[in-house]
Image (spheres, coloured by chain):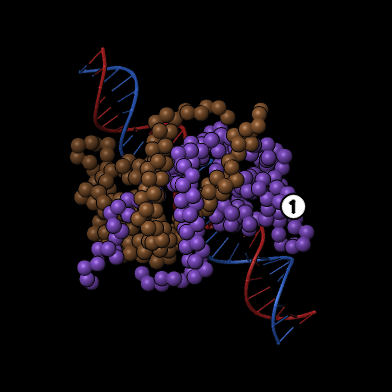
Chain colours: A purple, B brown, C blue, D red
Amino acid sequence: MGAGDFESRWLRPDVNAVWTRFLQVTHRLEHHIDRRLQGNHGITHTQYEILVRLADGEEQAMRMSELADQIVTAKSAVTYQVNKLSEMGLVERHKCEWDNRGTWVKLTPAGLERLEQAAPCILSLVRELFLDDLNCDQAAELDKLLGTWSDNLDAHDRNPVDHPEH
Amino acid sequence: MGAGDFESRWLRPDVNAVWTRFLQVTHRLEHHIDRRLQGNHGITHTQYEILVRLADGEEQAMRMSELADQIVTAKSAVTYQVNKLSEMGLVERHKCEWDNRGTWVKLTPAGLERLEQAAPCILSLVRELFLDDLNCDQAAELDKLLGTWSDNLDAHDRNPVDHPEH
DNA sequence: ATAGGATTGTTCGATATTGAACCAGCCGTC
DNA sequence: GACGGCTGGTTCAATATCGAACAATCCTAT
C-alpha cells in the first residue's frame, strides 16, 4: 500500500488522544455516579435510570421494550432489574390491556419517593462534573455533537452489514 | 423552600435532554464497537483496549495497575482479562525486576498481529461514528470539553467526601 | 534497624449483562 | 379463518465486573 498507509490504519495521534480520553471520561463518570448512588441511596445507576424513565412516562409507567430502548441494554437485563426493583417495592408490573403479550412497569409511591431522594444528589453531581463549566455556546455545541453521533448510530443500525470486510 | 425549588431539584429540561442523550450515545457506541469486535475478531472491547495500551507502552509492556488506571476498571477485572488474553496467547506476564510485587504484561507477537488485524476495522468505525463529521473547531471544542470533565473528575477524586449530605 | 502504612497483584463471592432459545400473542396475506 | 412471520417478555448459561479481603513487598520516619 501507498503513503497513506499509516493514516488509514491508525488514527492521527491527536485524534487518537481525543478518542481514548472520551472512553476514559465516560467510564470515570459512570463509576462516580454508580458509587455515589450505591453508597447513599442503595440503588445502581441503571436502576436509577429506570426510575427516571418511568417518572417521565405517561402515568409513570412504561413498557419493558421501551425501557430497554431508552436505557440501551438487552431486554433480559431489564427483566432482571425490574425484578430487583419490584422486590424492593419501587416498581410494579401490570398486564397490558390491549396487548396480552405486554407488561407495563409502573412506579410505586415508594419508588417515586426513592427517586426524589436520590435525584438531588445525583443531579448535583452531574452539574458539577458535567455541565456547570459549560457556557451556552458549548452546551449547544455538545448538543449538536450528540445529535450527529446519534444520527450516525441510527444509520449504522439501519444498515447493519455495512462493512463485512475485516 | 422558595421559588428556585424546581431548579435545584431537577435539571432544566433541555439540560436534562443533553445528559440523557449523552448516556444513550455512549452506551450505543460501546455496544456497537463491542459487537463488531467480537463478531469479526473474537475479542472484547476491553480486551482490545488492553492490547492497544500495551502496544503504546514502552517495550509493548505495562504494569497491571497502570493498565487498570488506563482502561478505568477494577484491578481484579484486569487480572481476569489478562488471564484470558494470556490463555489466548496474545499476552505474557513477566516478573518485575526492581519490584518483586509487580508484574509486567507484555504483548506477544501474536497479540500484536491480532491488534493489527482488528485495528482498521474498529478505527474506521470510530471515524465513521465519532469523528468524521467533526470539523477542526468542533474537534478542538470536544477536546476542551473532555479536558474540563477530566479535571472535574480529578478534583472529585482528590476530595472524595465532597458532599456527605443526601 | 524496624514498625506502620501504603502499594501490588490475586482470589473470592456477589451481582450485572449479554445473547440465544423459547413461548405467547399479534398481524398480514392468501 | 389459518398460516408464517414478527414482536414482547422471560429463562438460562456464559461471561464480566466490582469490592473486599488477603499476602507480599516496598517505603518512610523514627
Q: Quadrant of residue B7?
A: top right
Per the image, the residue denoted by label 1 is A94
- B28 to the left or right of C4: right
Q: Secondary structure at mark 1?
A: strand
- A154 to the left or right of B150: right
Residue visible at 46% across and 42% down in the picture: A134
Residue visible at 68% across and 50% down in the picture: A57
Q: In which quadrant is the N terminus of chain A drawn?
A: bottom left
B34 is higher (above) or lower (below) than D22: below
State the residue in front, B151 or D13.
B151
Look at the image and tell me whether residue B131 can be seen.
no
Residue visible at 39% across and 49% down in the picture: B141
Look at the image and tell me whether residue B165 can be seen.
yes
- Residue A86 appears at what percent x and percent y? 67, 45
- Residue A133 appears at what percent x and percent y? 45, 39
- Tag count in the figure? 1
**Hey, what amino acid is under mark 1?**
His
Protein chain holding label 1: A
